[in-house]
Every structure is written in C-alpha cells, then in structure tokens.
Amino acid sequence: MQETIGLIGSLCFAFSSWPQAYYSWRTQSAKGVKWSFIFLWLSGSFFSTIYALYYHKYMLLPNYLFGGVGALIILYIRIKEYKREHGAKRWCNILLMHVGGLVLYLILYIQYPKLLMLLDMEKQKD
C-alpha cells in the first residue's frame, strides 16, 4: 500500500511540469518562468536521478526524469524567446552566471569532505 501511495505521489510530481511545458510550447512563450527556477529544477532533477540510481531507489526515477524533460522543454522555449528579444550575447551571460553558481557549489562541496561523511552515514543507516 505504501509503495502504491509513493508511486502515485512520484507520478504527480513527474508530470507537474507538463502543463506549463505544453502551454509554453503552444504559445512559444515562457516569459513568466524565472531562469533560476529552471536551472534549479534541472539541477535538482539531475542530482536526484544520480541519487536514486546510486541508492537503488528506482521508484523515484519517473519523477526526476519526466519532470526534467518538462523543464528542458520550458528551458528550450525560454532560450528561443530570450534570444529573439535580447540577442545571443545576453543569453550567454545568463547561462554562465547559473552554471558558474553550480560549479561554485560543487567546488565547495568537494572541498569540505565532512559533508560527504554525513551522507555516507545516512547511507549506512538504511
């Protein structure tokens, strides 16, 4: 029973991005969706997929994969729209800012291995 409830919740989260993705595709506009939201969404989907694969929590994969596909569609529309309005140079600056923030986060995470030990201790509890 708990597995079924978890699967239903995971599928709801998985497809929660699709109405916005469909609307953005149909109207060719994702202007109201913030860049940081899209990049955080994609980063969360990517790292959560790695987590689910590493810990063999395959029930979570549809959530992260389908949600990530919806976010990629929204990102694609947002990029097209932004390039059309502002040109490619400003788009590159936004991309570098967000990717740079993600890289900085990863460097800090690697530099402080105690965070890794805490995660490993959580793994041993399971």
Image (cartoon, rainbow, N blue to C red):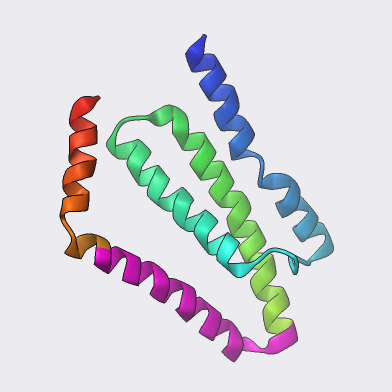
Res 30 → quadrant: bottom right
Residue 81 at x, y = what percent?
73, 75
Number of numbered discs overlaid on the protein picture: 0
Q: In the displayed image of the protein, which residue is found farthest to the right?
A: 27
Residue 69 at x, y = what percent?
57, 50
Residue 88 is inside the magenta segment: yes
Label the magenta part by its dominant secondary structure: helix
In-front residue for pair 78/112: 112
Point 69% across, 66% down: residue: 77
User: Is residue 83 toward the left or the right of residue 65 in the image?
Assistant: right
Give, as a single range, the part of the protein colored magenta: 85-108
Residue 66 at x, y = what percent?
57, 43
User: Is residue 71 toward the left or the right of residue 18 in the image?
Assistant: left
User: Is residue 117 toward the left or the right of residue 103 in the image?
Assistant: left
Q: Is residue 79 above or below residue 111?
A: below
Q: Is residue 109 above or below residue 6?
A: below
Point 47% across, 49% down: residue: 45
Residue 46 is inside the magenta segment: no
Residue 52 at x, y = what percent?
36, 37
Res 126 → quadrant: top left
Point 79% across, 54% down: residue: 23
User: Is residue 92 toward the left or the right of residue 76 in the image?
Assistant: left
Point 41% across, 45% down: residue: 48
